[in-house]
Image (cartoon, grey):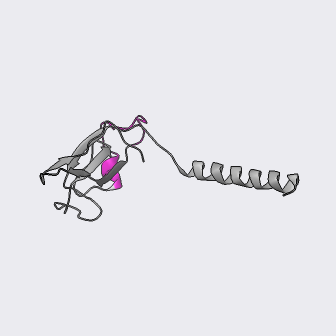
Amino acid sequence: MPLGRSLALLAALATQAQAYDDLLFTEDFFPLINARLDPIISPGQVSAHVHHVIGSSAFIASESFNDTQTANCTTSNLIDDLSNYWSPMLYYKWKNGSYSAITGDGGSA
């Protein structure tokens, strides 16, 4: 392959890698609560499974945007970020059939 084509291919691959990297963002979060709540799927009700919640202290079962803005604090390192983020809680199944929650000291979004 001629040198010019090799350099063009290398430049294209580098651009793709940079574009992928721009899609990701992370923040330092600390756990707020683990609860059977999901304001989107089951507003005001008990959720079908446990969620790991991070973010605004105003997290409630029937949360709206306005509710999040009344928070006194956040578990984010960005004090102006009063959003909430939640994901299903993960569990490890032991050989004896019991389960243990997988916990962490922070999160990525």
Give the quarter of the figure containing the N terminus: bottom right
Give percent across and percent down for residue 83.
37, 47
Q: Image point 25% across, 45% down: which residue?
A: 102
- Left or right: 12, with 47 as reference point: right
From this view, report whether residue 19 is shown above or below residue 40.
above
In the image, residue 48 lies in the stretch drawn in magenta: no
Residue nearest the viewer, comparing 94 with 67: 94
Residue for point 27% across, 45% down:
58
Residue 38 x/y as whole percent? 25, 58
Judge from the rendering whether residue 49 lies leftward or rightward of residue 29; answer left or right.
Answer: left
Whether 94 is drawn above or below 74: the answer is: below
Q: Is residue 77 above or below residue 83?
A: above
User: In the depicted view, which residue is nearer to us: 91 or 48?
Assistant: 91
- The part of the chain drawn in magenta is 65-81
Residue 41 falls in image quadrant: bottom left
Residue shown at the point (56%, 52%) measured from the top left: 23
Residue depicted at 75% across the width and 51% down the height: 10
Is residue 12 toward the left or the right of residue 17 in the image?
right
- Residue 88 picture location, percent across and down: 28, 55
Viewer-nearest residue: 63 or 11? 11
Q: How many marks?
A: 0
Queried whether the magenta region covers residue 66, the answer comes back as yes
Report the residue that reaches farthest toward the bottom: 41
Predominant secondary structure, magenta span: loop
Is residue 108 left or right of 94 when viewed as pictured?
A: right
Residue 25, x across and y down, in percent: 50, 46
Residue 75's quadrant in the figure?
top left
